[in-house]
Every structure is written in C-alpha cells, then in structure tokens.
Image (cartoon, rainbow, N blue to C red):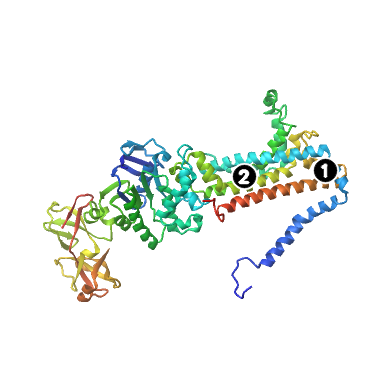
Amino acid sequence: MSASRTFRVLPGFRLTLGYTLAYLSLIVLLPLGAVFLKTATLSLAEFWTVVSAPRVVATYKLSFGMSLAAAAINAVFGLMLAWALVRYAFPGKHLIDALIDLPFALPTAVAGIALTALYAKNGWLGQYLEPQGIQVAFRPLGVLIALVFIGLPFVVRTVQPILEDLDTELEEAAASLGAHRWQTFRHVILPVLLPALLTGFALAFARAVGEYGSVIFIAGNIPMVSEITPLMIITKLEQYDYTGATAIAVVMLVVSFALLLLINSLQAWTASSGKTGTGRDR
Amino acid sequence: MSIQVRNIRKAFGDFVALDDVSLDFPTGELVALLGPSGCGKTTLLRIIAGLEQADAGQVLLDGEDASGTHVRERQVGFVFQHYALFRHMSVFDNVAFGMRMKPRGERPSERQIRDKVHELLALVQLDWLADRFPTQLSGGQRQRIALARALAVEPRVLLLDEPFGALDAKVRKELRRWLRKLHDELHITSIFVTHDQEEALEVADRVVLMDHGHVEQTGTPEEVYRHPATPFVYGFLGAVNFFHGRVDGSALRVGDDVLPHASQEFDAGAEVIAFARPHELDLVPDEQGDAGEIGVGARIARILAFGVTARIELDGLNGLGGKSSGQHFEVELTQQRVAELNLAEGQRVRLLPSRLKVFERNGTTGASA
C-alpha cells in the first residue's frame, strides 16, 4: 500500500468485513452448522437410508419440481404484471400495486386455508373443476397453485424498477430500425431485464422450497403424491426422530444452495455480459 | 425522397401541439425545424417518422400517403437526442441491429453485415470503437454511432431529434460541421429539430421556424435572417431591441421620443413594434435629455468591453422626466466607437437605429425602414 489513501464513505474494509462475517455466522451459519453437526451423528449408511427412502424421494421431486415450475410461472406472469403496472395508466392501478405485496404480509396458513376452501371438492371453484376431471386440492397441482401465490411478489418487485428505468426510446429506436414487436422484446428489452428477472426467479424459488404453511392445507399430504419435503421434516420431528429430520434438511439445503448458486452465477453472467464483455466475433 | 405534410393537427389533451401544419421537404435537402421548446417541432418530426399519430392530416413520403404505415415500414432513420443506443450490445452489434432484424429472405449474410458495419463506422470515423460498449463512449461518439446505426438500414429519409442537444458547446460545434459534410456526401433528405438558431442557420439548407404549433416562416438561412416575416422570427433569430410606437408621418413616436421611419406601408396612427439588432443601433451623448431630438433616451448600465466589439447594456428612460422605463437595450459598438464617444457607465445617451424592422402590432405585415 502506498501512503496515499483514497477517501471512503463507509468505515474501513476490515471493520465492515469483520462485522459481515460475524453477523452472517451468528444468524445464518451457526444454525445451519448445527443441522450438519446433528446429521453427522448418523453413519453414512444410515444417512443414505433415511434420505433415499422412496417416500422421501417423492417429496424431493414434488418440492423442487413444483418450486421450479412455480418460479417459472411467476417469472412469466410477474413480468407481465410489472409491465402493465409500469407502462399503462388504468383506474385502480395503485390498488393493484398494493395488492401485489399481499402474499408477503398474509400469514401463510391463512393463504393455505383460503386456497383449500376455494379448490376443495365442494369449494367455490373446486365444485366446477372436479366434474371436468381437474382435481386441484390434495394433488400436486394444488401445491403448485399455493407456491405460485406466495412467490408472485418477488418477480414483480425485482423487475418493476428496471422496467421503470427502461427508456421507451429504445423500443422506438428498434422499431425505426425495422424490428418487429417480438424482435424488440427479444433483443432489446429482455436482455436488459434478464438479470432482474433471474433474481426474482431465484427469490421466488427459494421461498417456494421452504414454504410450509400455505401448502400443507391444500396439499392434503398424501404419501407419495402430495407430500412436500418440509412436511417430511415436521413428520420426523413429531416422531422425535431429530437426526432423521436434520438429514433431510441437509439434503434440502445442499440442493437449494446448489440451485441458487447456479441461478446467481447465471444472473451475474447476464448482468456483466453487457458491460465488460468483448462482444461476438467480428 | 421528398416528404410532404398536409394539414397536420395534433393535440395532447387540451394542448394543441400542431395546428394545421403543411410543409414540403424537397429531395436531398437538409432542413432544420427551429423553434422554442413546446412549439411542436419534435411532435412533427415524430409524426413524420410514424412514432406518433396525427389527429388529422397526412404525411406523404415520395408522394405516397404514409399515414397508415408503421414506423418499421417507413424506412426512416431516426436519431434521438439521448442516442437510444442499446447498452447491452457492442457498437458493432448496435450498428448491425437493423440488418439482423430483417426477415430471413432479405437479411444480408454475416459477412455482408460485417462489411457494411465497418463501412459505416469508417464513415462516422469511429471504426476503432467497434468492440466497445456505448457506456464506454463519449456523448459525441455515441451520437455518431447512433447515426451510423440509423444509416445501416439505408433509410429513405433521415430524421434527427435535437441531435446535438445533450452535448457540450465545443463538441456540438464540431458535430454540426461534420453533419453538414456528411449530408453533402450522402444527399439523403434530412430533417433535424433544434432550438438553437445558430445551429439551424449554420447547418441547414432551409429553415422552418415554428411557434405554438404554427409554421411562422420557411426559407434559406439568409432569407429568414435578413427578412424575418414575423416579430417572433425576428426575435428568435438573434438578440433584439424593440420599441413600441405609433406611426406619425415619416416618424415613429416612441413615448415622448421620435425615431425616423420612412416607410409608407402603415397608416398614420397605426400601433407598431419596431425591432433593431444590437449592431444596428448607435449611441449619441445626451447630457440634458433634450426633448424633440431624434433617438430614444437611455442610460448606460454596463459596458462590456472585451472581445472584438463592445457590448453596452442600457436602461430605457421615460422621455423628459428621465425616469427608468423598465425596458432594457443592448447595443454592440466597435471598440473604436466606444473610445470616440468616451462612454461611461451611468451616462445618458440616445439610441439611434441605422436600420429598423417595423411590424404592425398584433399583425404580421412588416416593412424595413
């Protein structure tokens, strides 16, 4: 280091980093570490038996599969919602804007009960859907609907500010250069929105994987059909099988972490490709 | 390609942006739409481009009605004030965009695209920036890239919306000259919008002056500068002094003062407004404030004696009483003349116009004295 020092607004690097690490350890790493420690009391073979039981494997598929699907659905419709809210003026716009955050605030159990009441065999919607052969409650489809519901705000709220900053002149420029609507969306708008969209997707996904309250009511928790992994953990806990519960939790954590890392690196890559990349070959 | 607009009307709510505007833009000319902000010039440009729809009237491109044609089919190159470059694309990809968006059948091969992009980048003298991203460029460079991008689709007309508005004075001046040169090479029918009269007069073949949604005057830069058709045009094209007065035989009564005025165009007693540019006024000392002498009384407020000529700011005086009339004048004299008159701040003088442009009040007829 040379003698000259640059001025920084925030206090020193060491203090900030030290605080960050201490805080993160206390709040996040310590509880998670305990999960791994508890699991370590199992032998590898025991661990494998617990986490690879067919009933448990079925919950992984349901939880991760439906979470990814719900996040994908939210990415598409959240983008549309954000678009409508940013680009158009219509009566009740502020009301709708406020409504979007409701899934954040609502106790998840309330959401679950409400959804079940709607989609159950004798519910408002269920009574019409059931005769059509569409069973929602107590089926994976019900799980999906609950996860879509709770994940909705994430994509809208991450994409909205970026859309607000997006100049309509860019679209006009694209149109004047002969681009059709789809081409303008695909080549001009989407690349700008993609990092935010991926962040929203990751958040919605993470939330969906860990969701418990709103899902268990509508899922009906039928083994091998509509049980989610968090429910499996609770079930183990209720049977005082603490190590079994933490073992499943470890699998969830590792898979979630891997998926989030993947999404985040994808996000970082799309965000940087517009600024520092060297472009395509000439 | 020629452009004609016929009886264009456009309103935003209660605000009438364009009121029955008809104009001809002949092939190959570089025309400036000049006016203060809010005069409708940008709206007109956007209607010609198809980015905005007129409430009534037609846009004819090459004699064909284009009113129902979408922007992307009009083959117009549009350059925005704030460049509107695609930030996530390199300069090369920005310029190539229009060609890559063409339907498969018409799309040139990547090789042709590459050649064309480099040709255009060479034309705007920025070939060495092909790999950069827009954020890494200066404002002037960005605008030249935006121009290259617009030219890549071989537009029939080029429309520029305040192309140099966001640039600093020095770069603006440079780009102005460069745009003129480029136009002389390409001869593509071009319209550019500006609120800077110097820019319009310097660059354009023809100038269209607009105010409040109306066309005030059309003509070559020299025509509009030398023979402004309306008080607005006179005032907009440069610094100006004006005198409210009444025609009285061969004189013009301005309050208690008198200015010579030879034109017979106005009836006796007509209320008129007379204009003179700063360099068209001379000063004569007037210590006593004599009544009846020719010239308008004023007091020197400030003498700015730097530069080739000296600029003198004056406060108007109200006839005999010598009280301030609240009006201000600006006179430009040679340094020699200032020394000769031995002018000082606070001194009483008379303003003598060498040339007056007189308009009837609330009218548009004009005459030079």
Mark-to-mark CA distance, 2 and 1 = 32 Å
Task: Look at 74% across and 44% down and name the residue there.
Answer: A210
Q: Secondary structure at mark 1?
A: helix
The one of B242 and B218 positioned closer to us in this rendering: B218
Which residue is denoted by mark 1 in the rendering?
A51
Mark closest to the chain's N terminus, 2 or 1: 1
Figure quadrant of the N terminus of chain A? bottom right
Front label number (2 vs 1): 1
How many other residues sit within 10 Å of disc 1, few (<14), some (14-19) or many (≥20)? many
Decide: marks 2, 1 in contact (CB < 8 A)? no
Q: Residue furthest front?
A: B111
The image quadrant of residue A128 is top right
Task: Look at 43% across and 43% down and name the residue there.
Answer: A176
Side of B304 relative to B245 (left or right): right
Instruction: Return the x and y of residue A187 as percentages of the image width and height.
Output: 52, 44
Side of A216 relative to A170 (left or right): right
Task: Look at 59% across and 53% down and name the residue there.
Answer: A272
Marked residue chain, label 2: A
Which residue is denoted by mark 2 in the rendering?
A155
How many other residues sit within 10 Å of disc 2, few (<14), some (14-19) or many (≥20)? many
Q: Is residue B320 above or below residue B14?
A: below
Amino acid at dot 2: Val
Q: Which mark is residue B95?
A: none
Instruction: Return the x and y of residue A139 as percentages of the image width and height.
Output: 74, 32
The answer to whether any part of residue B207 appears in the image is: yes
Amino acid at dot 1: Val
The image quadrant of residue B201 is bottom left
Instruction: Return the x and y of residue A65 as percentages of the image width and height.
Output: 71, 39
The one of B314 and B322 positioned closer to us in this rendering: B314
